[in-house]
Image (tube, grey):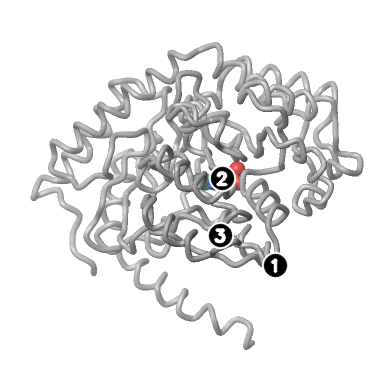
């Protein structure tokens, strides 16, 4: 049984946390009522931890497009893009993504995780260097590991530290791939992209930006942080996902480098997994069109983000460093976090539970993500429930 020995520590941690309610952490959405409500544990629950930023998961246009594609093209492609899995919808979506980002090329992947894995492991290899923000998502770390390039981390959002690390690389810096995110998924803070671009240009390095949480959220057209910062032309590769603002599943890379089209044929996570189902592609295309046609969704999202941030701030909670649709509450201990998370769920609010090592600086978080689909009343209900838990009589009890 030796291969299982390494999980003993994990089992012990989960046992400890179960004592304060973690047993119910495997939340089952028993019935979805809307983008922002579901029945959970038999109770009507406000969903405040879904990444459904534009609330498009129940958009009638997206659902119709998906249903039509199911009838016309079937339930799945049953193969990879390189074999039998490239349908006209995949090609059309790639053109639409390239057009949206004002880039020459785009590649569609089966998930955002696979997009990071595929692009990083194909662009860099043994002998190259990949220089990443320390708080990057697991899929970026895993892509780096798969690439077998030298992995160098710089301090989160610290362009001076990035500069130092590139300088140390000497001649290799000109070939290095620098990777940052637009909005960071745990605390909702932006990368200082203008400064990062200045540094990468100083060394002639390449820059990849994962805009998973900023597509549809930042920029005048919703293209992300690169657009908002005015540096889109300086970003070599934009990575993203269909699983947040676009309400489906899948990933992409957009780029102006002419080689992008060619390197898809050297990209193992692109070549060796089945392509997204036609219905997923169809709803994603419709969601992208809706994102472009309805900027008011982005405005509503930001109104909700401001509203929740200010209400929670007024309660004296310690929040992430800037207002964004990701509203993170810093907690004192994993145990307290689990207790609060359970208490919120019991009162009808679902948020994300973030425990070490998933949290950025070793702390524990309760993470809310706002949606354009939340009504102002729902945002108030979320804040009211946080407020009720602050009252001494209502604070979740100590661990038993
Ligand atoms: N990048 C970032 C920054 C993410 O937060 C995520 C998902 N949480 C991904 C990539 C992976 O996206 P997907 O869910 O499409 O695999």
- The numbered dot on residue 359 is none
Mark 2 lies within 8 Å of ligand 1 (Cβ measured): no
**2 or 3: mark nearer the eye:** 2
Q: Position of residue 88 (x, y in %)?
A: 84, 25
Q: In screen coordinates, is 82 left or right of 379?
A: right
Task: Tell me how far mark 2 sits from mark 3, CA to CA.
Answer: 16 Å
**Vertical placement of 382 versus 12: above or below?**
above
Relative to the observer, which residue lies in front, 204 or 96?
A: 204
* Vertical position of residue 84 compared to residue 160: above or below: above
Q: How many marks?
A: 3
Q: Position of residue 254 (x, y in %)?
A: 66, 34
Residue 218: tell me if it is visible: no
Q: Examine the image and state in which quarter residue 148 appears.
A: bottom right
Q: Earlier in the sequence, mark 2 or mark 3?
A: 3
Q: Residue at x 42, y 45 (%)?
A: 184
Disc 3 to disc 1, how far (Cα)? 15 Å
Q: Position of residue 65 (x, y in %)?
A: 70, 18
Q: Which residue is mark 3?
A: 141
Mark 3 or 1, nearer chain start: 1
Quadrant assignment for ligand 1: top right
In front: 241, or 38?
A: 241
Taking the image as shown, residue 99 lies to the left or right of residue 50, namely: right
Most extreme residue toward the left, as rendered? 392
Residue 126: which numbered mark, if any? 1
Q: Residue at x 79, y 50 (%)?
A: 273
Say few, some or many: other residues with alpha carbon within 10 Å of mark 1 (under 14 / 14 to 19 / 20 or more): few
For the residue pair 181 and 5, the one nearer the viewer reads as 181
Q: Quadrant of the N terminus?
A: bottom right
In this figure, which residue is indicated by the disc labeled 2? 207
């Amino acid at each position: 049984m030796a291969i299982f020995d390494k999980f003993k520590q994990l089992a012990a941690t989960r046992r400890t946390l179960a004592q304060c309610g973690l047993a119910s952490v495997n939340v089952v959405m028993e019935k979805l009522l809307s983008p922002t409500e579901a029945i959970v544990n038999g109770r009507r629950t406000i969903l405040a931890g879904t990444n459904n930023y534009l609330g498009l998961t129940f958009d009638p246009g997206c659902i119709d497009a998906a249903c039509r594609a199911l009838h016309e093209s079937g339930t799945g492609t049953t193969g990879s893009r390189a074999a039998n899995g490239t349908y006209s919808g995949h090609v059309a979506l790639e053109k639409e993504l390239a057009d949206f980002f004002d880039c020459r090329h785009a590649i569609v992947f089966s998930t955002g995780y696979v997009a990071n894995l595929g692009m990083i492991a194909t662009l860099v290899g043994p002998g190259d260097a990949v220089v990443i923000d320390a708080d990057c998502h697991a899929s970026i770390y895993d892509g780096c590991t798969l690439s077998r390039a030298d992995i160098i981390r710089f301090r989160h959002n610290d362009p001076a530290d990035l500069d130092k690390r590139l300088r140390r690389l000497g001649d290799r810096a000109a070939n290095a791939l620098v990777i940052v995110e637009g909005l960071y998924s745990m605390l909702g803070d932006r990368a200082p992209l203008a400064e990062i671009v200045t540094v990468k240009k100083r060394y002639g390095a390449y820059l990849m930006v994962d805009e998973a949480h900023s597509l549809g959220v930042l920029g005048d057209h919703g293209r992300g942080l690169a657009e908002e910062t005015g540096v889109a032309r300086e970003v070599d590769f934009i990575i993203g996902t269909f699983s947040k603002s676009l309400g489906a599943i899948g990933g992409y890379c957009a780029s102006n480098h002419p080689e992008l089209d060619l390197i898809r044929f050297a990209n193992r996570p692109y070549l060796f997994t089945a392509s997204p189902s036609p219905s997923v592609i169809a709803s994603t295309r419709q969601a992208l069109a809706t994102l472009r046609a309805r900027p008011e969704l982005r405005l509503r999202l930001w109104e909700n983000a401001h509203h929740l941030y200010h209400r929670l701030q007024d309660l004296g909670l310690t929040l992430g460093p800037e207002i964004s649709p990701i509203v993170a509450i810093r907690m004192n201990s994993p145990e307290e976090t689990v207790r609060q998370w359970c208490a919120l769920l019991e009162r009808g609010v679902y948020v994300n539970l973030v425990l070490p090592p998933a949290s950025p600086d070793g702390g524990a978080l309760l993470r809310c993500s706002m949606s354009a689909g939340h009504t102002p009343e729902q945002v108030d209900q979320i804040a009211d429930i946080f407020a009720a838990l602050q009252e001494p009589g209502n604070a979740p009890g100590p661990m038993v």
